[in-house]
Amino acid sequence: MEGSYKKNVLQSFIIDSNEALDFKLVREPSDVDNDETTFKPEMSHQIFGENESIFGYQNLKISLYYTAGKLNTYLGMNYSKKVDPKQFEGATADDVMGAITPKLPPGYMTNLDDFLVTLNKEQSFKPPGELLSTYSINKGSAAEKNFELYSCTIEEPSFRSYHERLQTFLLWYVDAASFIDVDDDRWRFYLIFEKYPCDGSHRYALCGYATVYLYFAYPNKTRPRISQFLVLPPFQRVGLGAELLNTIYRSFLKDSNILDITVEDPSEEFTRLRDFVDAQNSKKLSSYSKEKLQQGFNAEMVEDAQRELKINKKQARRVYEILRFEATNLADVEEYRAYRLDVKRRLNIPYQKEASDYKKLQKALNAEELRSTLSTSTKEQRIENLDKQYQMLENEYRQRIEQLQQQLLQSQKNKVPEPVIIQRQLSDDCNAEIDTVSTTSIPSLAFTPPPTFTTTLIQKTPALASRPTPPIPVTTTTPPVTCEPSVNQPMVTGVLVVERLTEPEERNDREPTKDTNKWPWLLTQDLLQDGLRLLISGQEGHFHGGTLSGISPPEFYGVVDDVAGNLSAWAQPAAVRNTRLRLLESQVTLPPSGFRFQNPSDHSTPLRQYELY
């Protein structure tokens, strides 16, 4: 019992290092006691190990403060209790200060009062380097903020010591971060500062920075590579990342000696940012017009992107696929299919090379040697891998297009976005052998629903209940689904269509038809009685009203039609995963396994009105 007790007590001395650490960019003394100025690291394993934990303290708080402009540094820690080695068989607390201080440049302070005195020097601080551009948000309002972007080299007076303090942020926000060799004169530095009013003048606060290395490109060109890129948490989600990246681009665009701009081992976050910026810029090129996008990727696109935007060929192809996806009418079966095939042909190139290598080895090796030398994937494995790759790409492209459309909507604030639902279409891509796609489409200038969500139908006085839903085989393909916008109506009732993440494993495709009798599962507007309306999921949990013209499998829907909450109309495809229907009602009757509602039009009971929670 005593051993178990000691073990439990020792557990209370283990602290999450990310939670223990507080960062601040201090502008005035009151910021030290203001919790709103505190921000946290994204990671700490590069200092405290893979578990990101600290042993030996209770209520540990580590303070790593910087003055907002000059980045004078303070490091301190406090705690309520420290482990006693005499009580716990020699167990000692981790050396927190010893883990952090080797990463800090000389001159950091451990006395808070000394640190606060250095704030008096902030007024004399001016950003190093050359001013490249300015950027503002909330212009003309009380919340207006102004930013300035600078570039410099290590030869800039006093920048070497400033960079030593600046680069310490990387350890907490960039995985596998390493300090660069600043003695190499091919490094370029880009910095963002907020210019804020203070005591009748202006001061500067660091917001983020990036480093770029100028590589040689044969035979006589230069290829800049973005190495480090960071916007600090207090300044994220206001467009500074895109502005910084565009500033880097613009600094090289007019230089004929620059071949293109690349990125060193980009993170997922930076890849999203880069896609957004490149796609936004490429839309201005004539070679990326909607008409030319439909004709396929070509040399003109590569040349224009490289010449005008310094985008390399690989990224130009990715931007093409994003913009063509945006320009593709997903309700048009052939147009959508042509897009999928175009992307899958590119994804299939490695498999074609694998097949070519196999044929060459067949001529040189006997069957036993061939088996031991080369492990080739089966046709089924190749089809499965190809489909997974495509699905991942399409999901990524949807996110990029949503960013582009949000940016466009922000510039057209007086226009109301129109909700749109597009069918999920199953098809046979003969050249790609398999095709599975997601439900939600993103047509140009249209509101973009999120890729996944859950259906909830609630009666006006519900009590919570939740049941799993049995899979129902699907034997039909999807007719078109459209929705006329009905904005500014009270959004209180409706049937919410839910996307599923996987395709049915069994299909029996037929030619689509608009004849409801040939589509026994088709739910149409005339069946929505007593004011029942379709609600389309929007951003941040909001919904848009619409008029239903047709929903059928493989969409997913349910209708509750009586006071007891019985489920009378139900449709669900086979192999549905990660999706469920919640009916918040004390008495919920689900259909038995194998139940199939053949024809909603035969149902005599009107579908009642329900509130959407």
Image (cartoon, rainbow, N blue to C red):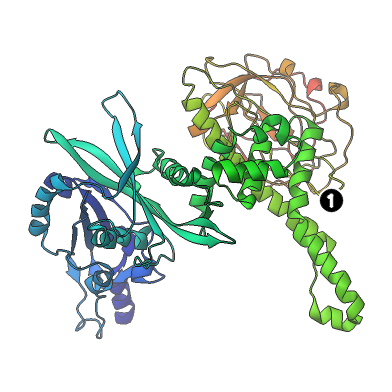
Residue found 29% across the figure and 74% down from its top:
10
Q: Is residue 487 left or right of residue 156?
A: right
Q: Quadrant of residue 289?
A: top right
Q: Is residue 604 left or right of residue 2?
A: right
Residue lying at the far front of the rendered structure: 220
* Residue position marked by numbered label 1 in the rendering: 433
Vertical position of residue 263 compared to residue 298: above or below:
below
Q: Nearer the viewer, residue 85 or 560?
A: 85
Residue 547: where, in percent of width, then height?
66, 18
Q: Is residue 328 left or right of residue 187?
A: right
- Is residue 323 among the parts visible in the rendering? yes
Residue 341: where, in percent of width, then height?
79, 45
Instruction: Determine the secondary structure under disc 1.
Output: loop
- Is residue 578 among the parts visible in the rendering? no
Vertical position of residue 33 compared to residue 187: above or below:
above
Which class describes the residues within 10 Å of circle 1: few (<14), some (14-19), or many (20+)? some
Which three-letter amino acid code belongs to the residue tagged 1? Glu
Q: Nearer the viewer, residue 82 or 389?
A: 389
Q: Nearer the viewer, residue 55 or 95?
A: 95
Q: Quadrant of residue 327?
A: top right
Residue found 47% across the figure and 25% down from its top:
411
Residue 431: where, in percent of width, then height?
85, 48
Residue found 89% across the figure and 32% down from its top:
511
Q: Quadrant of the N terminus?
A: bottom left
Residue 452: where, in percent of width, then height?
60, 40
The number of numbered badges drawn on the structure is 1
